Image (cartoon, coloured by chain):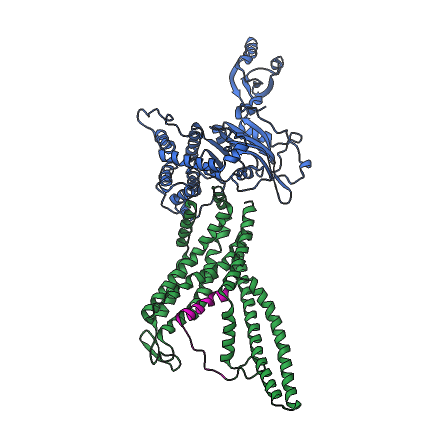
């Protein structure tokens, strides 16, 4: 059975004077609260898909994962290895970030899931159906990078068109379009032609169009491209709410700070391979440390086990303690205090997603970032940078 | 069904947004208006309130309803609808497939639960909507003009709607193939025009060789009759021998023309028959409404061929007979086979291609 919007979500009423955030929350609530017709429609869609795929389902074990890809490869003409055996999993109720340098294969992977590109080989499932199953697309939302709706359509018409192409009944898609236009703050512009829109406004309409079918899974390729900071925050809010409703979101973006804020897990694709996959916390755990700014001398620091010393000048120094356990650093702090070293600050530090990304795309042997673009060498000649990580079932990196 | 309607609706909006659609429609209106302001009376032609006395064109020679049908079937449809308006329609619709398969646009369409072949074919049909609306409006307006001004309410006039649509669909299938493969509006339009030129060339070649063949067949018939009469009359060999030589020469020439004609005819069979599809309108009007337009005054001698004994009328009638012997099934059937083959090819290509 499909995970549907539950009425208990957002059940707590807003108390007090609503601020802008509260207004936005209400919009979200209206947009994502399950209307009966919506449920009926999805049920019909589900029934239709189910009936036509009973045989397929009986032969394949349905995956509880929203996306469960195994060994996806894509080789374009001319020996361009866009994907060289990608495996990744996205759980229900999860925001998953897909990162990678230009030409790493991110868009190709997303397009394979959306049947825009045909894989060379692919195993696995999307929403419990084999990769490339056309009927599944009725439950998937997709915002392509550089999407282009016909400029003669108005914003409303573009969203309604997307709904109609997902076989939504007219009344439902009209109502849903109203809700989504309000959600992305485009109601005032709904009757203007897309050709008159700015990039950010087109992006908002694109997002609305990708959500019009009330999808279980949304694939967004650079969703905040061209959107102003307020709009970006609103988009993040939308995605967060979708996650809380048990829906899955896969975001492909280069804005790592944004992904870091909302993603439960990320995968870093480099030259057609998953270089790393896991939660941001687990991927950066090895880099976690405490930084202590003090007046310690190099001699005093050398007596501390495993502590890195860095002079900051004017008698100040930075001590880096490789541990994320506050208990573990207490003896070191005690030792400094007993030596009458003045401690200015103690801060927990960890690698940012950007640092992790840069580390992932850097050749460890040369320290130089790998060239952008897909790999054109034969698979045997592919330069190895790091062994792709696998992931433990709990979502952590192993 | 919802998807198909959505695509049709989007195509209608697209037409509304294209200025060329309205320009073409306005020009169609002008052509019909031009038909309406021309009149025919006992003395000749009238244009608005001006009278032009013409001895060879008046109601004594041609009934007024036939006059309007003639204008419609011989001038308005072949020159406006099947020529100028078709070029405008091709310019207007050539961008449909390049736009559809362009990055960002095709992603949106293919990510919906619709099969690629169905998506392509539906878009193809929506492209024909342009011509359907143009021809529909034009023909209905012409039907009214013929009814009001010519006094003949002839529903067979409306047959031009499917015929012109068919004619356009042959070219549009090629345009769709090229647009999908090249992703270029200009390339697809220009190569489609070249293809049309090729079809026109093959058709003209076939017509010329058919004319030569027909003329020689008539000529040979006369020569053989003359020879037979001479032999039967017991004429001396000095008389029969030149006749025999003439027969042999005609036969030799006829064989050559037949050979050329066979090549052109084979090529024509494979290609869509654009000209003959449009000519079906005249054939239908002739057969169903009795529209007979008298040919030019009969000349005793014709220019074509060495034999000076063939009259234009006889030649024209034989040629017309040959053309009328070509069945509608052959004309439309083989053309549709070509169109289906092209559409099948482009469907296969579209279904397999990565975007």
Depicted A320 relative to depicted A25: above or below: above
Q: Is residue B298 visible?
A: yes
Write down the quadrant of residue B197 in the picture: bottom right
Report the chain shown in blue.
A
Chain the render paints green: B
Residue A324, compared with residue A177, is above or below; it is: above
Q: Which residues are magenta?
A: B274-299
Placement of the C terminus of chain A among the 4 image quadrants: top right
Report x, y in % for residue A87: 58, 32
Image label count: 0
Position of A332 with respect to A36 (left or right) is right
Residue A215 figure quarter: top left
Residue B81 magenta-highlighted:
no
Query: Looking at the figure, which quarter contains the N terminus of chain A?
Result: top left
x and y, in percent, of residue B49 in the image? 31, 75
Q: Residue at x 36, y 35 (%)?
A: A37
């Amino acid at each position: 059975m499909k995970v549907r919007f539950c009425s208990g979500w957002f059940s707590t009423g807003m108390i007090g004077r609503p601020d802008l955030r509260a207004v936005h929350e209400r919009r979200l609530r209206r947009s994502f609260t399950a209307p009966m017709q919506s449920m009926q429609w999805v049920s019909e869609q589900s029934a239709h898909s189910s009936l036509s795929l009973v045989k397929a389902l009986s032969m394949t074990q349905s995956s509880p994962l929203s996306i469960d890809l195994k060994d996806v490869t894509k080789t374009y003409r001319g020996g361009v290895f866009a994907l060289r055996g990608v495996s990744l999993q996205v759980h229900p109720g999860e925001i998953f970030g897909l990162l990678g340098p230009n030409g790493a294969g991110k868009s190709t992977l997303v397009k394979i899931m959306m049947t825009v590109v045909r894989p060379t080989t692919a195993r696995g499932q999307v929403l419990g159906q084999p990769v490339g199953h056309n009927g599944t697309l009725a439950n998937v939302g997709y915002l392509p990078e550089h999407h282009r709706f016909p400029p003669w359509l108005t914003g409303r018409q573009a969203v309604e068109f997307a709904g109609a192409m997902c076989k939504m009944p007219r009344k439902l898609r009209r109502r849903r379009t109203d809700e989504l236009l309000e959600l992305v703050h485009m109601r005032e512009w709904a009757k203007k032609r897309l050709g008159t829109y700015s990039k950010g406004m087109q992006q908002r309409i694109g997002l609305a169009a990708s959500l019009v079918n009330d999808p279980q899974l949304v694939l967004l390729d650079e969703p905040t491209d061209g959107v102003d900071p307020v709009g970006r925050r609103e988009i993040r809010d939308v995605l967060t709410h979708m996650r809380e409703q048990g829906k899955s979101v896969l975001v492909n973006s280069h804005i790592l700070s944004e992904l870091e804020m909302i993603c439960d897990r990320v995968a870093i694709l480099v030259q057609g391979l998953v270089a790393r996959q896991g939660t941001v916390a687990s991927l950066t755990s090895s880099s976690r440390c405490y930084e202590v700014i003090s007046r310690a001398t190099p001699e005093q620091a050398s007596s501390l086990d495993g502590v890195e010393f860095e002079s900051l000048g004017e008698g100040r120094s930075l001590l880096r303690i490789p541990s994320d356990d506050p208990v573990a650093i207490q003896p070191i702090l005690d030792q400094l205090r007993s030596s009458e070293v003045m401690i200015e600050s103690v801060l927990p530090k960890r690698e940012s997603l950007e640092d992790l990304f840069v580390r992932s795309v850097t050749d460890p042997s040369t320290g130089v970032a790998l060239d952008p673009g897909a790999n054109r060498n034969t698979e045997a000649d592919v330069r190895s940078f790091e062994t792709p990580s696998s992931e433990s079932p709990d979502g952590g990196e192993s | 069904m919802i998807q198909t309607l959505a695509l049709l609706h989007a195509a209608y909006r697209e037409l509304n947004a294209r200025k060329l659609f309205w320009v073409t429609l306005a020009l169609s209106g002008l052509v019909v208006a031009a038909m309406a302001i021309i009149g025919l009376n006992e003395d000749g032609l009238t244009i608005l309130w001006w009278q032009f006395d013409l001895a060879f064109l008046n109601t004594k020679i041609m009934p007024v309803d036939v006059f309007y049908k003639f204008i419609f079937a011989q001038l308005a449809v072949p020159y406006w609808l099947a020529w100028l308006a078709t070029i405008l329609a091709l310019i207007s619709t050539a961008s449909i497939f390049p736009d559809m398969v362009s990055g960002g646009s095709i992603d949106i369409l293919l990510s919906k639960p619709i099969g690629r072949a169905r998506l392509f074919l539906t878009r193809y049909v929506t492209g024909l909507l342009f011509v359907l609306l143009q021809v529909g409006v034009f023909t209905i307006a012409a039907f009214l003009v013929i009814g009001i001004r010519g006094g003949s309410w002839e529903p067979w006039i409306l047959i031009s709607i499917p015929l012109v649509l068919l004619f356009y669909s042959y070219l549009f299938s090629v345009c769709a193939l090229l647009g999908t493969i090249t992703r270029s509006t200009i390339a697809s339009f220009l190569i489609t025009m070249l293809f049309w030129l090729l079809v026109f060339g093959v058709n003209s070649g076939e017509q010329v060789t058919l004319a030569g063949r027909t003329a020689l067949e008539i000529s040979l018939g006369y020569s053989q009759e003359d020879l037979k009469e001479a032999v039967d009359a017991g004429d001396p060999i000095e008389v029969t021998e030149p006749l025999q030589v003439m027969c042999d020469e005609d036969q030799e020439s006829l064989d050559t023309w037949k050979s050329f004609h066979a090549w052109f005819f084979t090529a024509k069979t494979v290609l869509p028959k654009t000209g003959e599809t449009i000519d079906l309108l005249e054939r239908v009007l002739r057969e169903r409404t009795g529209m007979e337009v008298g040919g030019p005054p009969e000349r005793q001698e014709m220019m074509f061929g060495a034999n000076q004994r063939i009259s234009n009328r006889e030649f024209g009638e034989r040629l017309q007979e040959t053309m009328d012997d070509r069945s509608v099934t052959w004309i439309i059937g083989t053309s549709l086979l070509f169109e289906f083959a092209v559409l099948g090819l482009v469907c296969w290509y579209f279904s397999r291609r990565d975007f």
